Image (cartoon, grey):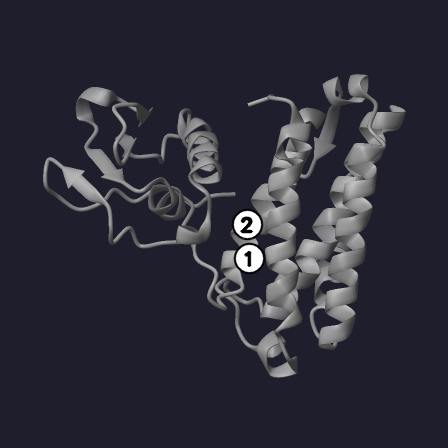
Amino acid sequence: MTADPLLLTGDLDDATTRLLRTAADLGPADLAAPSALPGWTRGHVLAHLARNADGFVNLLTAARTGEPIPMYASAAARDADISAGAPRPPAAQLDDLRHSARCFAEAVAAMPAQAWAATVQSRRGPWPAALLVWGRLREVEVHHVDLAVGYHPADWSAAFAQRLLHEVAAGLTDRADAPAMALRFDGSRHEVVVGDRAAAPTITGPAPELAAWLIGRGAGQRLAVAPDGPLPNPPEWM
């Protein structure tokens, strides 16, 4: 999935606006309450989103300059920054989120066309710079759901959900712990197949519901399985 990254900037702007609107409504008690991510408060999620934007700025700078700039100084530094940022008051959280999002947008605007062809070192290894805008969009949309304050996978666009589903399914192709399954969006004949198609049940439903279930953000209540049976158990995402 290396389409022109600039085609996604409008979607990212919209997703960021929605996230900031949600964050602006959170008070101290809201931020201290648990998120949908085990062990993290909502403050942890917002701090992570801000530091994630900073990390992507580092990767964009690496792609633009050719310097070997890591996404984070270290895994320990990343975790420490999130822990330190989690208990901040709402105004500080919101200012940080806005500032980091603006810096990311500025870093995207500063990219010359040839820099998008670079490969950078993400937390999980080499990654095409052309996927960085998509990566940020994915972080914003998925973690907005993780805030558990009324934004749901059903609020994702079909295009976002389908792209996420294809990406996650592609990542399961070579995993021995991934069950065989054929995923089909409502109203589509196209299947996304994981494993041996002959042994795979067909799972059908709305694209956002399929994607959310596959990444552990939904129980799949609106999904149908054929032949009739239980939903498979996808391995943990990321």
Q: Residues within 10 Å of mark 2 (few under 14, many from 20)?
A: many
Spatial CA distance of label 2 from label 1 is: 5 Å
> Is mark 2 in CB contact (under 8 Å) with mark 1?
yes
- Residue 136, image x, y percentages: 65, 42
Residue 125 visible, this orientation: yes
Query: What amino acid type should be assigned to the residue bearing mark 1?
Result: His
SS at mark 2 in the image: helix
- For the point 50% across and 64% down, the residue is 38
Which residue is disc 1 drawn over?
144
Position of 17 with respect to 53 (left or right) is left
Position of 76 with respect to 21 (left or right) is right
- For the point 76% across and 58% down, the residue is 98
- Residue 114, image x, y percentages: 80, 16
Q: Is residue 78 above or below residue 66?
A: below
- Residue 9, image x, y percentages: 67, 37
Query: What amino acid type should be assigned to the residue bearing mark 2?
Result: Glu
> Looking at the image, which is closer to me, 225 or 111?
111
Residue 65: assigned label:
none
SS at mark 1 in the image: helix
- For the point 68% across and 29% down, the residue is 6
Residue 126 position by quadrant = top right
Residue 141: assigned label:
2
- For the point 60% across and 49% down, the residue is 15
- Report the label total: 2
Q: Single out the residue that lies furthest toward the bottom.
A: 29
Residue 128 visible, this orientation: no
